[in-house]
Amino acid sequence: MNFAAPVAAQIIISVTSAVAYLLFYVGKPPSLNRTIIKTLSIAALAALAVIMDGPLLLVAALALSALGDLFISRDGEAAFLAGLGSFLLAHVAYVALFWQVVGGAAALSPIFAIAFAIYAIAILRWLWPHLAEMTAPVCAYIVVIFAMVVTAAAAPLALWPIIAGAALFALSDSVLSAETFVFKDKLRRWTAPVIWSTYYASQALIAAAFICPHFSV
């Protein structure tokens, strides 16, 4: 079977959707078109991972992320919580995936873990007065993304897209948390493009590490 056409189609769908969202929908009010374009960006990466026979955990992480995008693109606290839960599960899948790559706990860097823990605690302390009933879900999310980043950081430098992707994911989530809970969408005009750009780049980089022939995971 010739995979060239399906692969090219998913790449075009993903990149086109991501650029269209950045140019026309980022920071805009919820709409059906906005939800479709945002969800397609990562859903196409999940489809690409399936076509390229990528790891099941990668497919699961990307699919859960696309589901999270679908929920978070809608209004309301229930939709936000559903999106947060989807992304939490996506990070759990990434932790398990990266764990297989690095070969277990022995590869982890205690120094990096401590440094990133300080960063995570500082972010949480800044958010804390603004979280209210969202305290428990956000704390759980921070713990999981901490595990994801620390595990990714132990990957070999030859697999730098995993490391860069995890770092960009953490950056995107940090800006999103600040915008959502501290600034209350007041800076969305500037933060929204940063959040989307770093988020999409993170997912694309991680996917590339596992399905691009140039890398050998």
Image (cartoon, rainbow, N blue to C red):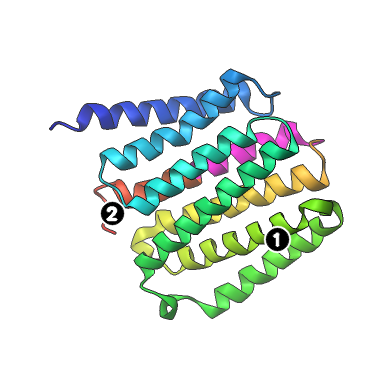
The residues bearing labels 1 and 2 have C-alpha atoms spaced at a distance of 34 Å
The residue identified by callout 1 is 139
Mark 2 nearby-residue class (10 Å; few <14, some 14–19, many ≥20): few
Which residue is drawn at the image coordinates 75% and 65% (left, top)? 122
The prevailing secondary structure element of the residues shown in magenta is helix
Residue 147 colored in magenta in the image: no
Q: Please tell me which residue lies in front, 184 or 112.
A: 184
Residue 190 colored in magenta in the image: yes
Give amino acid for label 1: Cys
The residue identified by callout 2 is 215
Q: Which mark is residue 207?
A: none
Exactly how many numbered labels are in the figure?
2
- Residue numbers of the magenta segment: 186-201
Mark 1 nearby-residue class (10 Å; few <14, some 14–19, many ≥20): some
Q: Is mark 1 on a helix, strand or loop?
A: helix
Locate residue 116, reporting x and y percent. Answer: 62, 68
Quadrant of the rendered image containing residue 33:
top right
Q: What element carries label 2?
A: loop
Point out the image quarter for the N terminus.
top left
Quadrant of the rendered image containing residue 124:
bottom right
Locate residue 137, reporting x and y percent. Answer: 70, 55
Point out the image quarter for the C terminus.
bottom left
Locate residue 34, reporting x and y percent. Answer: 59, 23
**Closer to viewer: mark 1 or mark 2:** 1
Left or right: 140 as drawn, with respect to 126: left
Left or right: 116 as drawn, with respect to 95: right
Q: Extreme left residue here?
A: 1
Marks 1 and 2, the one that precedes in the sequence = 1
Quadrant of the rendered image containing residue 158:
bottom left
Locate residue 166, reporting x and y percent. Answer: 51, 55
